[in-house]
Structure formats: C-alpha cells, structure tokens
Image (cartoon, rainbow, N blue to C red):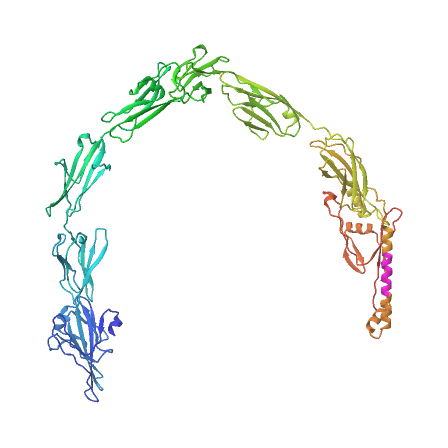
Amino acid sequence: MVAHLLGLAFLYLTTSPVTFAANGMSVYPVPTSALEVNPNWEVVYQDISVYGVVGKAVILECGPTVPDMYIWSFTQPGTEAIKAVVYNLGKGPRIQKLAETLGQITIISNSAAVSIEKLPLAAHGLFTCQAFYDIEREPKVYYYYVHLTVRVPVSKPNLLLSDASPVEGSTMWMRCILENGTEPIKYMWQHETRNGNITVIAQGSSSIVNMTDVSRNHTGWYRCIATNAVNTDSSNRLWLDTIFGPDLPEINVTPFSITERGYSALERETVSLLCQAQSNPASQYVWFYNNSQVYTGPQFTITKILRMHTGDYACLAQNTYLNTRSKKTISLTVYYPPDGSPICSVEPALNYTSLKLICSWPGGFPLPALQWKGDLVDQLNSQDSSTILLPPGGLIPNNSLFSCVGSHPALKQQTECSTRTLLPPAEPLCFAYVTNSQQHLMLSCSWDGGAPKAFVWWEGPGGQSKGGQENSNILVLRYGTARSGEPYICYAQHPLLIQPKTCRLTLEAPVLLTQRRVISVYEGTDVQLTCNLRANYLPVNEITWFNNRGADIRDTSKYMLLRTSAWANLTVRDTDETQDSGEYRCSTSNAVGGAEINVTLVVKKHPMPPNATLIKVTYNSRQRNQVELEWQVESETNGGWTGFSLEHRLVSERPGKGRNSNGSLKQAKEKAAATDWYQNIIQDPDVRSHTVQGLTPTFTYQFRIMSINYRTVGYPSSAKTPAEPRSNMYPAVIGAAIGGMLFAAILTALLLVYIIRNRNNNPRLHDMLFGSQHSQSRENINFPEDEVVSGLEGGREDRGGSSSEGPVIAIPRAASPLTIPPPSATPSPTPTIQAPPTDDNEPVSVTITVKATGS
C-alpha cells in the first residue's frame, strides 16, 4: 500500500507457504497459517514475496495500517537466527547496526514500511515485521513474513570462437560467456553478412553453439544475446573468416573475340586478360606466356598488342594460407589487317582536262590487294594499279561508275569502294549582294556538286577579275565602282566537258513600275498606290515613298505601308481633297544608280444628289396619330444618292371647340413655334414611301424630305402639312352607341318590373330604389381638346363625384415621334358616344353620367 502511495515501481507476489532456495542459498521454513491465541488475543501470520534488483530500490510493507508498535527483523537463508533490523515501540523508529549490511534502509513516514535503496545481494532473505495494534484495549499481533528475492541482471556477454578463421569443411564452436546474472538465462545467436542481412542461427538455454562442415557462406559477423527476467544484453560482433580456395580460374579477354583456336585480337589494340579464382584469403596470380612467367597480378594488360604476341597465355592462382593452387590456359592470336576499308576518289588532272582514279588502303600485313573494275578501266589493261590516269578530250561519259576491290588474308570477305564521275547539276549560278554596311558589292558564282568539283573564275571589264577556285568563287568590288551595262562573266570548267560553261551578270540601275500613274477617287475612301521593282540582278535598297508634300512616309493613322524586297504599296486612308491631292513619289537605288516614279492622286468631292419632292402627305385614320408619305426623285437614272432624310416638326396645336386661346393653349403654341426639325434617316435608296407613327392627334405637323449620299445632302423639299383621310366612320360609330344605349334601357326596365312585383321578398331593395326623394342626373359633355389641355396644365377632372388624375400628354422636344409609342387610351367608367363631325371635321365626345342617391 505504501509503495502505491509513493509511486515506486517494485514487484511483490503473495504466495502460499513454500520452501525457498536461490543461488545456492539455504532453505528456511515459512509459517503455514494464522494462530489465534485466545478469545481476547489474536495472532495473525501473512506471507508476501517481493522481488528486487541489485542496486535498485525496494519497499517492504508492514500491514495496510500503521501499527502502535512494530519490529522488523531479518533471517539470512540457511539460518534460523532472527536479527532485529529496526523497531518502533511508540517513541519513533530505531535502526539497528545490522541494517548497514542490507542496504540504505529508511522508514517511510506515517507508516511501518521499510525502503531499501541500493539493494545489495546480502539483502536476499526473510524479513519479518511484528505489528501490535490496540495495545491499550485488546491487543492484536500480526506477523508479516516478507520473502525478498534479490535478482542480478545479466552482464554484457563475451563471445568466444574456437577458431576465428576456420578452413572450409572443418568444425568449430562458439561460446557466450557471462560474469553474472540470475537464472534462468536464454541465449540467441545472430549472423550478419557483408551486405547487412541479419539472421538468427540458434537460440536456447545453452551458451555453446557447435558448427560442423563450415562453408564460405558462414563468413560474416556473429554476436550472442543473453536474456533473463531482469534485462537483455548483447555481445560485441566478431568476424568469422572462412578459409577456402582457390577455385578453377576464369579468364576474361577484352575486347572479346573468339576463334577456332581460342581468342583473337587486332594489332595495336589494348588487350586485357583478367583472371579470377574464388579464394579466401584472396588468390595470388601469376601469368605465363608460352610457359614463361611474364606478369604477377589478376589483370594482365597488353598495350598496343603486336603480331609477336600471338601464343598461349596461362593463369596460375595460389592460396598462400592453404598452400593450394589452380591453373587455366588460353590461346590468343593477333590479326593486323588494314584499318577501315579502301578509299576511292576521282581527281582532276592535266589542268582540269582529264581525270585520275586513286584507290588507297593503308596498313595491314601483308599489304592488301587493290584492283579497279569498270569497262573503261578494263580497256586500259591496268587493273592492278591503285592509280589510273584516264584519257583526256571529253571521252569519259557522265555518271560513269568505277569500283576498287580490296582483299586481305585477315578478312573473310573482300571490301570495295566506288566513285562516280558527275557533272554538277543545272547550270552555274551567279548573283550579286551588298554587305550590310554598303561598303562592298559581292558577285558570287557557284557550280555546286559534281565529281570532281568544277573550277570557277571571274572575268569582268576593266581588269575586275578573280582567279580560279573549286566549286565557287566571289568577286569583291567596292560599292559604287561596278561598271553599269557591261557584263561580268563567270567561267566554270569541268574535266568531263571540252568547253567551260559561263554565267553572266549585267549590272543595271533599278527600274520602278506602277499600275496607274494617275488615280482619281472620291473623298472619304481609302486608296492604294503601287510601286514594283522590275527584275534585276543587282539588289536594291529599301523602296521609299514620299507624300504630296515631299515628306518621307512612315506608318501612321493616315498612311499604311506594305513592302517586300521587290515592291512597296502605300495606302492613303480617308482621303481629303485639300490635304491628299497631289503627286506621290516612289524611290530606290542600288550600287549602280537610282530610280524613282511619280503617281498623281486626284481626290474629288462627291456630287450633290438630285432633289426629292413629297407627292403625298396624308393621315391614315381619324385618330391623326399616323401619317403616310410618298415622294419622287427628279432624276431616277442618276444613282448619286445612298438614302433619304425624312424630317418633321411641330407647327401648332389645333384649337379646341368652345375654348379661348389663353392659358395652356398659348404656351403650347409658343413651344410649337420653337420646335426644330426632327430627322429620320432612310438608308435604302429604292424606298419611295414611309409611314410615321406615334404622332399626337391634337398637334399639327409639317414634313419634308431630301436625298443624301456619302458626304453631301440635296436640297430639302417644300414642307407639307398632312391632309385628312377621305373615308368617314363617324355615323357607324354613333349608330352602334345608340343601339347599345337602347339595349341597356330595356334591361333596366325589366329589372325594375321584377323588383316591383317582388317587393315583399326584397323590401329593402324596393325602398332603396323607390323610397328616395332626391334623385337626380347630371350630364357632362366634354371635348377631347379639353382633356388634352387640362392634362398639359396639370388640372384634374371631376367625374361622378370622384377626383382622379387626367392623362398628361407632353409635347415632343428632343426625340422624333417615330420613337414615341402612341398614347394609350385611359378607360372611362362611363360610356362615351362620339357625335357626328362638325363643319370643321372635328370629332365631339359625349359623356353621360348617371348618379343615384338614397334619402
């Protein structure tokens, strides 16, 4: 219990009464049961087993509670003497001198437990605690027998090998030696190879391992691991080196080449002979050439092997520890053919008038045999010669094939090479170019290809010439010193031709061309001016454009340039008569001279389009909110217009019937007088009619039209006011209104008759209709003009005793009526009857309102 309170780690075991012995210690008896002395006195015996480790701490407890008095004593195994260690008779603990041999003993406060620090092996034995409880009343006596077992951890093992270097096939043993440690002890044996793999080869309680028939696979590191109930420890590694060999040697030849007799090598190659024989310790190697010792070591290298090195090579491997040896012999033959293969070539001879065939294959022993083959060579009877001179005079045909065959005893097959006589393809190519700094003019002549290569040279006027070179030639002249109009001739001579080929360059100043010298356009269009360079041998500088004021033109928002080395096009954007008309100049130059060409640009204004006349301006209905217009053009054959501009404006407000010209009407007329023309563009030139919608019926408008093109506008036509439509729908409308009123009157009469006949069933309804004494009707007749004017003035109209906002119609100012939707009609709560037209063809609206009130 005390141990648990202090948090100390220890092991105790409560056992039944046994006889105990350890490490050769004597056996001592243990009480087997508790004894009660008498009814008033009680003696109790308890057995406890506790395990401790040497040098560690252990706690021995004396009952679960603190006794009044206690006495701790110790009995050494093999004896029966009980010696006091510590006691407490109520005046504090007293430690005896014997405690010094049992370790550092202290009494834990508020308990009778004993703590032993740095536990020695001498503390192994029986500790007895006599505890007395309730001494003043009815005393109780407890005997606590604590069997302390002191264990010793295993020490670091020491590995012992009977033979650290056993011979393969022999027998050996390994022992794991421990200085101390409490039994039982387990042993484990590990083997570690050179590459780090660890395996367990044996384990058990024996400290010795026997190994029979030791092999080379047993070579490696070994260690033993000892384990008991206290700890585990391992020994240091020991290396076991198995002695064996040597095995039969293996010889590797580099470079590797096998023949019927053995190995072969080429002369002047580096040949390496490597001998390897498995052995421990490593074998000693001795090399023999034709039974004569030539080298000691595993690798025998012959640098630049010669023919004299052909023979037998033997490798002797020796194990000096075992005094054993093994030997192997190989045969090496040295071959020395010529390097590579024959080389064939055809070269010019006799100042490029004839050909010479050359075949070479240096090296080899014996010398290789070379032979030319071909129809022309067979006729010369000179097959065995490596160099043959062919006859001159252009008798050798083009694309003739000549072959040279080489043979050598060291080679299994013949080797041959071939060459052809070829004329260069096409013709000699001549061209001229200028250096970037424009300091030199270079005339290049080349005739690429052919076998052999052609001989090229320049001849020019005034001694400007260049000696011959193969394949190509360049004549360098200072810029500006070239002769204009006089040819420079390039000559190209080939042995297959009798006469040389020529290529001529005649240097001339550049010549510029254009598609049109005079270009005429209308204002506002984009125009392109062209400038082309006629084909010329001599390259030119950049083609430059100058505008009508003589300034150099670059890419801007006004001008756009597209150019190559052979042409340059100028585009003038959005042409203007005053700014862009005039002469434009295109200029360039080369090493011989310069050239320029003028292009005249004429920018014309667009002609004025023909006049248009309105022939019909009519309202299409009595609502007066849409007008139909038709027009004609004076000259239909003249296509100088792109559309029409249809304009209208507000002239005045039509005066209402029965109204004066004061107030809002006067203000409306003043606004109408200040109204501007509103424009509507019609982009179709073939249209001759149009309908204008969204007009205000109470206003009077004027319309006019004019034709337009890209940049000009024709004269406007005379302004016209729309005429009234010819058809009149007012009688039909009035008739329909009267019919509706008659139908409503009949229904009202039938309803009144029904109410009178059923007055008893509906007395309240009857009294409400016929009991009222103040019924009246009121008739309001309003004109449409009054409605509009009241809306303009922001006034209100009283209908049926209720006040509501009237419709407001605004006079258009900044927008065309074409974009204003037609005014929507506001529904009236009372029926409206349209009166017949008056003398001035103005519609009159009649409104009848009926109101009934109860008394």
Observer-nearest residue: 372 or 690? 372
Q: Which segment is the magenta one?
A: 737-748
Q: Is residue 132 above or below residue 442?
A: below
Q: Residue furthest bottom?
A: 39
Total number of numbered discs in the rendering: 0
Residue 743 among those drawn in magenta: yes
Report if residue 372 is visible in the image: yes
* Horizontal side, residue 639 vs residue 492: left or right: right
Q: Residue at x 84, y 75 (%)?
A: 760
- Residue 595: image quadrant is top right
Residue 631, by quadrant, is top right
Q: Is residue 481 at all visible to an observer of this figure?
A: no
Q: Residue furthest top?
A: 462
| Figure quadrant of residue 609 | top right
Compared with residue 369, is residue 352 higher up or lower down, i.e. above or below?
above
Nearest the eye: 248 or 82 = 248
Q: Nearer the viewer, residue 599 or 368?
A: 368
> Which percent across, then down, holds residue 112?
21, 76
In the displayed structure, 501 sits above or below 686; it is: above
Q: Is residue 375 magenta?
A: no
Secondary structure mostly seen in magenta is: helix
User: Which quarter of the image is occupied by the N terminus?
Assistant: bottom left
> Quadrant of the image for the C terminus?
bottom right
804 horizontally vs 149: left or right: right
The residue that appears at 77% across and 57% down in the rendered structure is 804
Q: Position of residue 341 (x, y in %)?
A: 30, 28
Residue 612, given in percent of the width and then of the height, sits at 77, 34
Picture coordinates of residue 320, whole percent (x, y): 11, 45
